[in-house]
Structures are given as C-alpha cells and as structure tokens.
Image (cartoon, rainbow, N blue to C red):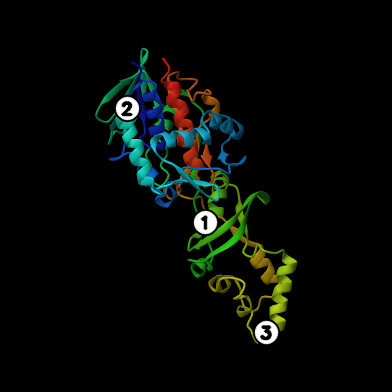
Amino acid sequence: MNEIIIIGGGASGFIAAIMAAREGSKVTILEKNDKPLKKLLLTGNGKCNISNLRGDADSFRSNLPDRARTLYERFNIVDTFAFFERLGIYMTEKEGRAYPASESAASVAKLLSLEAASLGIKVKTNQNVFDIRKDGDRFIVATEGWDYSADKVIISCGTNASVDNAERLISETIAIKYGIKHHKYLPALTKLYGEGDYLEKWAGVRTFGIVKMFCDGQYVTEDYGELQLVNTGVSGIPVFQISRYANIMLYRDRKVKLEIDFFPDCDDEMFKEIIEKIRTNAPYKSVKDSLIGLLPERLVGALIREDFSIDRIVRTIKHFEFPLTAGSKIHESQVCSGGIDLDEISDDFECIKVPGLYLTGEALDVDGACGGFNLQWAWSSGAAAGKAAAKI
C-alpha cells in the first residue's frame, strides 16, 4: 500500500489527504498545532468563504501568474463544489463569494474531519517537522519526537501569517537543502503603515474610497471599497488587495506611496462645484462645516484646516498622499506572498528536484485576492497533489 505523509493539517492538507485516501493510500497528517484546521475556522469571519465565482486574471497572484492559473484548473471551482457536495455541504453565494449554506466554518471543519476519519486517515497533532530526507526509495520525516517513514510526502504547511511565530517553515528548510528556488515570504492581505499627526484623529473612520499605489513615482495598481482608517495607517479590503505589492516593493527598499480618493463618486471639477455651491448657499458655515454632509466629520477634522482654499480641499480629499513608512508584519497578515517557485513543480504539484515530494497551498508562490481565492488555491493544489501522490 502506498504510504503518504502530509505535513500540515489545514485546508490544503486535509483535501490532499482525503483525495489520496480515496485512491487507496495509507495517509497520516502531521499537524504542529494542538488541533487541525485552526485557520479554517477563522475564514470569512467564521462563515468560511470557501471560494469565489467571480475570478479574474488577478485572482491568483504569483511571480508566474499564468502558471498559477493553469495549475488551478487541475481542480477548479466546479470540482471544488462537487467535492463539498459529496461531503454534504451545499453552497450559497453573496456577491460572488461562496459560503456553506450553514454559514459556519466549524461545520466545514467537522465534515472534513469526519470524512478523513471514515477513510482511516491518521491525524497526529503537536508534530513539529524539522527535516525531510531520503532513505533509498523512502522518505524519512523527522519531528522533535519521532521519525516517520513514507513513500510520498506532501508539504501543506502554510505560512506564519496570522501567527506570532518567526520560526523557519519546513518549506523554506527543504528549499535551502535541495536547492529549490524560493521567494521570500512577505505579508499579503494586511493593513499598511504610515506616519502623520492626522492618524490619531482619523482612527476608527470607515469610508469608501479609491486607493492607488505608486512605486518610485510610477503607478502600479489600485482598488476600490470601504477603507478602515487606523492610528497606524490604513486598512480595509482595497488596502488588503494591494498590500502584497506594497510589501514586496518596501522589502526592496523602494519608495511607495498611496494616493487616496475619499470622494470617488465624481471627478475633481464636479467635487469643486459641489463645495462652491455649499459655500454659496450657506456662507455662515466654516470650511470644515461645509464638508460635513459629504464626508465623515472625523475625517474632515483630521485632514482639513480652516485656512484651506477650495482647490486645496479638492487636492486633499481627492488626491490624499499617504507615504508608506514600513512594511507590514507577517503575523498581522491573513496570508503571505512568496513560496516555492512554480517552475520547481510539475503539473501534478510534484517537486522536480525531489521526486515523490509534493507541495501545496501557501508553500507555493501563490497568494489569492480577498474573497475566497486563497482557500480555493488550497483546495485546488491540495486535491491535485493528493490524487497525484496516490498513484503508484
């Protein structure tokens, strides 16, 4: 019987285990935490945003994005829905985001665990893997308390995102040991940091806007949605969406700034006309009071002074410049960019330099946009790797 060790008891590791066991393999999951599927329980604010029906070219980010999309097709969203339906999980959709009908991440975790148990999959917790080596045709997976032997190994270890832990991951250890190209893990889907006396004043404000990113003065990307202004910088989904690019550039010591449009419903000229009309209709209002009906009052108080001209108000609100002062922290991010280069694996997610070793999820150089794409990559990569590893 084909014996497979899976390192990591998260979403990607569990679907890999289930797929391999369904093909007749003997499967053991080694999980370093005291319980498996911990991160899954937090996804979608506890509702489990399983996938997204509105994917586009930017859904899966990578140094090789075309390769990422090709690999995703090995087990795509249609396959994912069929897999979960077989478990008894049916989907609902909200603005493209797919959730289980139960709207409970705990129910998804439980049904994955029940399926794994029914297939005889062993789940061993508190197992910190620090090395993988070959012994003839077999792999030896070394933990702090035991050496496990297997025919195949699947690394589904994830990253240190959202975990206050700086220890080296097994994917990084293996990359160094076997000369596998690896991109540094950096924060993605996270808030961004800046400085200014306005930060304490605007902290707690939520408002819709457009965020554009510039690197060394050159436009890079932008996103739109609800912003969350905090006392250390900016947050919210549009900031999360561009944060991976900002953190990569900051890591390279490039100058990165955001330009924020806090009133995206019209262009500069129309916004100026709106302010002029308010000032004409209510000359008794102060400059700040003139803007209260347009913007959150705390935002106005943070950014606008009474001596501002109308042109300066327009520039400040429509083109607010926010230089980024430091990269984000990995433990504050939802996921990481970086990982094993996609040219280092086959279409079956097998490591080219170490046959029999497979890589999935965040161990690979793929990170998804907000909205279920990171979980979809976990399902896609894990399922494809599990099925492939089960072949004798």
Residue plotted at (25% across, 26% down): 146
Mark 3 and mark 2 in contact? Answer it, CB < 8 Å. no
The amino acid type of the residue labelled 1 equals: Gly
Q: Is 185 above or below relative to 24?
A: below
Q: Earlier in the sequence, mark 1 or mark 2?
A: 2
**Mark 1 or 2, which is nearer the eye?**
2
Q: Is 1 above or below relative to 112?
A: above
Left-right relation of 116 to 320: left
Query: How would you rate the neighbour count of disc 2 (Cα within 10 Å): few for under 14, some for 14-19, many for 20 or more?
Result: some
The amino acid type of the residue labelled 2 equals: Leu
**Residue that badge 3 annotates:** 282
Label 3 element class: loop
Front residue (pair 194, 372): 372
Image quadrant assignment for residue 140 = top left
Number of labelled discs?
Answer: 3
Question: Which mark, by number, is residue 236?
Answer: 1
Left-right relation of 288 to 1: right
Specify the quadrant that holds the C terminus: top left
Left-right relation of 140 to 206: left
Residue plotted at (47% across, 27% down): 384
C-alpha gap between disc 3 and disc 2: 73 Å
